[in-house]
Amino acid sequence: MKKNIMEGFILCLCLLMLAGCQKETAQNTDIQTTEDLQQVASQDIFAMDTYMTVTAYGEGASGAVSDAVAEIERLDALLSTGDENSEIYQINQNGGGSISEDTSYLLERALEIWKSTDGCFEIGIYPLMQAWGFTDGNYKVPDETTLKKLLPLADSSKITFDEKDRTVTFVQEGMEIDFGGIAKGYTSGRIMDIFREHGISSAMVSLGGNVQVLGTKTDGTKWRVAVQNPNDTESYLGVLETQDRAVITSGGYERYFEQDGKTYQHILDPKTGYPAESGLTSVTIVSADGTLADGLSTSLFVMGKEKAIAYWRAHKEEFDAILVEEDGTVSVTENIADSFTPDETVKKLDVISEM
């Protein structure tokens, strides 16, 4: 059995190199001034099972980064499925209960995305993820009996949520939820809020490859964000120039294992309980809403290209996308086509139009 887990710092390193980032050496005076360098604050942290980097520029950067790191740690403790003291662990064990404002917001958004994507996004997938070993690294292919038993638990229609009282109840015994599909996107959005409260207008966070940027670089140019190559985790597919956006990618390359000559990746189709076989190898979502971007990157991967394009056309005001197929074809929605520069290894680039 073979396994491969992408280390978040690889993409982070690519991002810092490509972004013309303000942590460059002092010799790069054409990129940053000495004053800019004196006003940068950056901190690395491991949380939510991934490597993260938080960087801010300008007066108040140090305090902003400190508060951002504290927020990451708070949300990690709140939303962990493995920490017995976390809120999520407790409601999973008890089949529901009272929940905090953060969890209430995430549950509301999760149910919205679940409904909007016809169940392609599913927070009730956690028991199935456990059965496959994707939660602890003890990978295995579950038998049909196990999957048949667990599949009905992956159904958000069996979650009762009282928004006013902030209480949640799981209708079916054995249900457990996991916000892993939107937690990092929500966290990066919260960090942007904290930065704005500190008066920061130029900043970047990389949460295990989930990137969100605030404003532009300090020289007024857009951020250059590297998009991971799903076929080679040490290279990138291309570079996207953007500002005030989250750029979040999901793909089977992030976590997978091989058994009896077959590869099984970690993005499960809630309708089958098996790894999604949609013909896509990665989906990148670009949106001002980090929570939405995180949820849709998984949802559109499960949908496959045709349904993903149809979904974008129906919601094009909310996000843009970069889809990568198994044959290497890259498709980019037209709103960001001019901002995306593909790597020379990309052999076919299609632009997705509104119609």
Image (spheres, grey):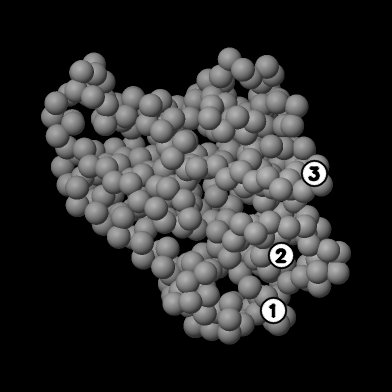
Q: Which residue is mark 2?
A: 131
Camera-near label (3 vs 1) is 3
Badge 1 density bin: few <14, some 14–19, many ≥20, Cα 10 Å:
some
The mark nearer the N terminus, 3 or 1, is 1
Taking the view exactly as shown, the residue that stands out farthest to the front is 1
Q: How far apart, in angstroms, are the residues tagged by discs 1 and 2? A: 13 Å
* The image quarter in which residue 182 lies: bottom right
The mark nearer the N terminus, 1 or 2, is 2
Residue 31 versus residue 102 in the image, above or below: above
In terms of secondary structure, where does tag 1 sit? loop
Residue 341 versus residue 74 in the image, above or below: above
Q: Nearer the viewer, residue 146 or 64?
A: 146
Q: Nearer the viewer, residue 112 or 229?
A: 229
For the point 60% across and 61% down, the residue is: 135
Q: Amino acid at mark 2?
A: Ala
Q: Amino acid at mark 1?
A: Gly
Q: How far apart, in angstroms, are the residues tagged by discs 3 and 1? A: 30 Å
For the point 68% across and 45% down, the residue is: 2
For the point 61% across and 82% down, the residue is: 95
Q: Which residue is mark 3?
A: 262
Q: Nearer the viewer, residue 318 or 304?
A: 304
- x and y, in percent, of residue 186 in the image: 46, 56
- x and y, in percent, of residue 60 in the image: 17, 47
Task: Look at the image and tell me in which quarter the C terminus lies.
Answer: top right
Q: Is residue 54 visible?
A: yes
In terms of secondary structure, where does tag 2 sit? helix
Q: Amino acid at mark 3?
A: Lys
Q: Which mark, by number, is residue 174?
A: 1
Whether residues under marks 3 and 1 lie with C-beta atoms below 8 angstroms apart, the answer is: no
Q: Nearer the viewer, residue 15 or 134?
A: 134
